[in-house]
Image (tube, rainbow, N blue to C red):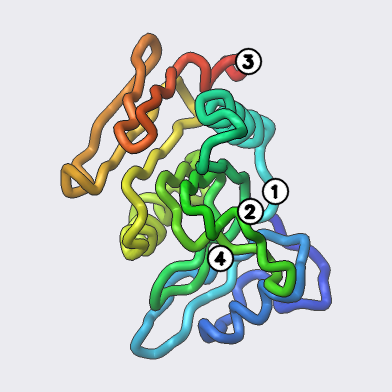
Amino acid sequence: MTQQHSSPVPQHGIPMTRVAFERLLSDESPYRYELVDYDPVLDQGTVLDMTGLSPEHAELSYNVTEAFKMQLGKRGPCRVYQEQYVEIPGQPSSVPDVVVTCDLGDREKDKRARPFRVRSPLIIVEVLSLSTEKYDRTEKFLRYTQCPTLEVYLLVSQDEPYIEVYRRSTNWKQERYSSGQTIHLDQLDRELVVDEVYEGVF
């Protein structure tokens, strides 16, 4: 769900260059912005305020985060973050619902950088909604694939226990998982149980 807010920063729907957008993010705004329809030749896109989630969206994001935390533990190199901006080479930063990184450099948050950006995402998760599904499946998906470290992209449905998985190793071929199934994540040597992701939602 997308909402608009009164704020001293540029509003929803404003055309903006990539540099100006990154500057907007550095203002520590409480809002969740994306620069959509970005044209790298013209260096211009449109700012959208993505703040405001349905209860189901928020709960699914939380469940995915907790599932990864349980799998990864606290002592290994991997960390999972919710709604943290991902730095993308040659593209505007984007903010996924959940991101997993196993790069030690991403654990050393540069306190001078606002907001903190994940530079080496391994797994990215987006919870689909009516207002963002097309973007998550097209422009944002393509943008994420420009991250050389990204290996897995997951799309989580709000409407039913259903998760789509795309892996770099299979040239981003679609895999479908539903209730009763388990997603194996080779990069982590861990598994994500679909029913655990949807616990308490349906």
Quarter of image, res 169: top left
Quarter of image, res 60: top right
Q: What label does residue 200 carry, if any?
A: 3
Label 2: element kind: loop
Give me the C-alpha separation between circle 2 and circle 1.
6 Å
Quickly name the residue at label 4.
34
The C terminus, quarter of image: top right
Quarter of image, res 75: top right
Nearer to us of marks 3 and 1 is: 3
**27 relative position to 21: left or right:** right
For badge 3, the amino acid type reads: Gly
x and y percent of residue 17 in the render? 53, 86
**181 relative position to 25: left or right:** left
For badge 2, the amino acid type reads: Thr
Mark 3 or mark 1: which comes first in sequence? 1
Label 4: element kind: strand
User: Relative to 51, is 159 above or below?
Assistant: above
Mark 2 or mark 1: which comes first in sequence? 2
Quickly name the residue at label 2.
2
Residue 64 visible to the viewer? yes
Query: Residue lying furthest front in this view?
Result: 75
Look at the numbered discs 2 and 1 and tell me whether their residues touch, using CB distance below 8 Å.
yes
**Neighbours of disc 1 within 10 Å: few (<14), some (14-19), many (20+):** some
For badge 4, the amino acid type reads: Glu
Residue at image position (61%, 28%) is 66
Quickly name the residue at label 1.
52
Mark 3 or mark 2: which comes first in sequence? 2
Give me the C-alpha separation between circle 3 and circle 1.
20 Å
x and y percent of residue 127 in the render? 51, 39
